Image (spheres, helix red, strand yellow):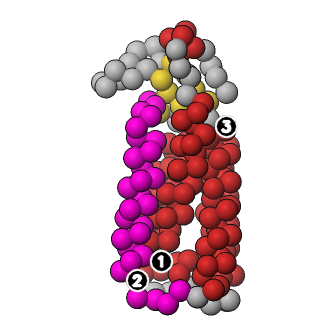
């Protein structure tokens, strides 16, 4: 196992654990932040990939496409299972709306990482080595977060539903 692969695994586990925790707990909702995270991860992913000297093969493209479709599907599902509530007291930024996907959202993260690892292993046998790069991992996570943000942005309770504290699914 190379040092880069070990580092990628540790980074991936830490990021998934952090995101799974955040999915399972109520978090104050900042509509701008739901777009900021995928944007930053996507930009960093592209920069890291641009520095990669590896040749891109047709196997890389096929497996990246499969992975992109799966991660977008999981992101859309996460956005659709997100629950909203109004907090009794605002946070330090004055926000009162909170959201979470709950245990199912955390499970979806575990499924996503298991599928990703599986695709990495199978793709490696077919010569798709770009899947294991840090840039690709960041781009996949950015796609997931962006798909989630698209759905959540449309579902955020607005107007008097937010002020009455109605639970919206």
Q: Position of residue 143 (x, y in %)?
A: 54, 57
How many marks do you count on the picture? 3
* 98 falls in the magenta region: no
Q: Position of residue 95 (x, y in %)?
A: 39, 23
CA separation, marks 2 and 3? 36 Å
Q: Secondary structure at mark 3?
A: helix
Is 147 placed above or below 85 here?
below
Sequence-wise first label, 2 or 1: 2
Residue 129 seen in the figure? yes
Label disc, if present, on residue 108 of the rendered structure: none
Q: Tell me whether circle 2 and circle 1 mark residues in contact (CB < 8 Å).
A: yes
- Quadrant (top left, top right, bottom left, bottom right) of the C terminus: top right
Q: Main secondary structure of the magenta part?
A: helix
Q: In percent of the image, x 63 and y 86: which residue is there?
A: 58
Is 31 placed above or below 36 here?
above
Residue on which disc 2 sits: 52
* 42 falls in the magenta region: yes
Sequence-wise first label, 2 or 3: 2
Could you classify mark 2 by the number of other residues whose Cα lies within 10 Å: few (under 14), some (14-19), or many (20 or more)? some
Sequence-wise first label, 3 or 1: 3
- The picture quadrant where one finds residue 125 is bottom right
> Which stretch is magenta?
28-56
Q: In percent of the image, x 49 and y 64: which residue is there?
A: 139
Q: Position of residue 156 (x, y in %)?
A: 55, 28
Residue 106 seen in the figure? no
Residue on which disc 1 sits: 133
CA separation, marks 3 and 1? 30 Å
Residue on which disc 3 sits: 81
């Amino acid at each position: 196992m190379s040092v880069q692969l070990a580092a990628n695994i540790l980074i991936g586990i830490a990021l998934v654990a952090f995101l799974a925790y955040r999915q399972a707990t109520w978090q104050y909702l900042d509509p701008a932040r739901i777009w900021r995270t995928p944007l930053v991860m996507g930009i960093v992913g592209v920069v890291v990939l641009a520095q990669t000297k590896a040749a891109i093969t047709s196997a890389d493209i096929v497996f990246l496409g499969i992975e992109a479709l799966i991660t977008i599907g999981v992101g859309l599902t996460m956005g659709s299972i997100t629950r909203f509530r109004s907090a009794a007291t605002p946070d330090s930024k004055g926000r009162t709306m909170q959201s979470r996907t709950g245990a199912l959202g955390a499970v979806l993260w575990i499924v996503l990482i298991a599928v990703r690892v599986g695709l990495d292993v199978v793709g490696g046998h077919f010569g798709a080595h770009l899947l294991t790069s840090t840039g690709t991992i960041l781009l996949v996570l950015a796609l997931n977060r962006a798909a989630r943000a698209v759905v959540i942005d449309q579902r955020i309770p607005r107007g008097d539903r937010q002020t009455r504290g109605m639970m919206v699914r």
